[in-house]
Image (cartoon, rainbow, N blue to C red):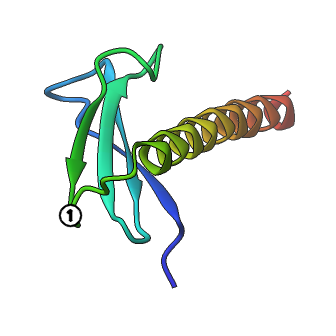
Amino acid sequence: MLPKFLLADNSQEMPDFIYVVHNEFPRFIVGSDIEDFSLNQEIHWIDEEPTDKALIAELLTEAEEFLETELENQDNYFEDEEDDKL
């Protein structure tokens, strides 16, 4: 089973942009500014775009929460790694 969300990037061409991939129906990829997820969002629907705007808003909120949690976890991981080297 795939995770509900994945992170992706294209840092060689768009170093300040990050993508969150939603793997459950309705599947989509949302790309955004890495510093401010609500800035310059580009949504690419893999499945048909839902007509329910509240559902879309909820999915984007979940994607943003996932991104924030993942970035915090990465920061903590690298901090722990640095502490282990000392």
Up-down relation of residue 4 to residue 84 (above or below): below
The residue nearer to you, when weighing 9 against 45, is 45
Q: 79 left or right of 22?
A: right
Report which residue position mark 1 lands on: 48
Question: Where's residue 60, x and y in %?
Answer: 47, 40
| Residue that extends furthest to the left in the rendered view of this protein | 13
User: Where in the figure is residue 29, as x and y percent of width and height?
Assistant: 30, 49
Residue ID at (23%, 67%): 47
Quarter assignment of residue 12: top left
- Residue most extreme to the front: 52
Q: Answer with the quarter of the image where residue 71 lies.
A: top right
Outermost residue toward the bottom?
1
Q: Residue at x 48, y 77 (%)?
A: 2
> Considering only vertical position in the picture, is 45 above or below 31?
below
Nearer to us in this view, 44 or 56: 56
Give residue 72's position: percent from left, percent from top.
70, 32
Amino acid type, label 1: Glu
